[in-house]
Image: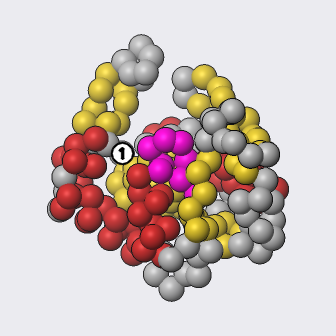
Amino acid sequence: MPLKQYIRDIQDFPKPGIGFKDITPLLINPVARKVTLTILLSSLRGQKVDKVIGVESRGFFFGMLLAEELNAGFIPVRKPNKLPYQTISASYDLEYGSDSLEMHIDAIQKGDRVVIHDDVLATGGTAKAVCELVEQLGGEIVQVNFLMELSFLNGREKLGNHPIFAAMKY
């Protein structure tokens, strides 16, 4: 199934000059959603995974599904002041500004094997920040996992030697 047909391009969102990849059509279609989940899971065959991180907010959709299928815990990583307990944070730059992300300080135990999931690998800043959070708490990154990669933005370069998988590439 050609999954790219379920990704809608929205120009000038969220700012002028940005081409946004809207995953809503993919989420709406149950067959496309199941195929996507199967592809994402195929990249993790034989891996022991303790926790799956979903990055706010579009990483939550498949992050939770991956955690369920892998029988792993789910960790939401959110923008500042959205989590109720004590957090650690990391700042990052993205193609249209900068921000920071937070995670509960007790979300990962030393030695936990973690999959990080987000919707898009663009410049790599968001994923790099999440990798820093995982490593700060002593977790081991099994894979950094994405629905799609915008390869022309060279985001992989910021992720070092961490295994990377994207279900679709642009």
Q: Residue flagged by tag 1: what amino acid is it? A: Tyr
Q: Residue at x 70, y 48 (%)?
A: 103
At label 1, counting other C-alpha atoms closer than 10 Å, the crowd grade (few under 14, some 14-19, many 20 or more) is few
* Residue 129 position in % (x across, y down): 69, 45
Foreground residue among 22 and 164:
22
As for residue 54 lying within the magenta part, the answer is yes
Residue 67 is left or right of residue 9, and the answer is: right
How far across and down, in percent of the image, does residue 148 sit?
40, 50
Which residue appears farthest toward the top when viewing the image?
Answer: 16
Image position of 160 (left or right of 120):
right
Q: Is residue 35 above or below residue 130?
A: below
Magenta extent: 53-60
The answer to whether residue 158 is above or below residue 34 is above
Q: Is residue 159 above or below residue 78?
A: below
Could you say which quadrant of the image residue 18 lies in?
Answer: top left
Q: Which color scheme did the rendering employ for the protein? A: secondary structure
Residue 157 seen by the camera = no
Residue drawn at (38%, 21%), measured in percent from left and top?
A: 13
**Left or right of residue 44: residue 93:** right
Element type where label 1 sits in the image: loop
The image quadrant of residue 115 is bottom right
Q: Is residue 55 magenta?
A: yes
Q: Residue at x 31, y 42 (%)?
A: 23
| Residue that carries the numbered disc 1 in the rendered image | 170
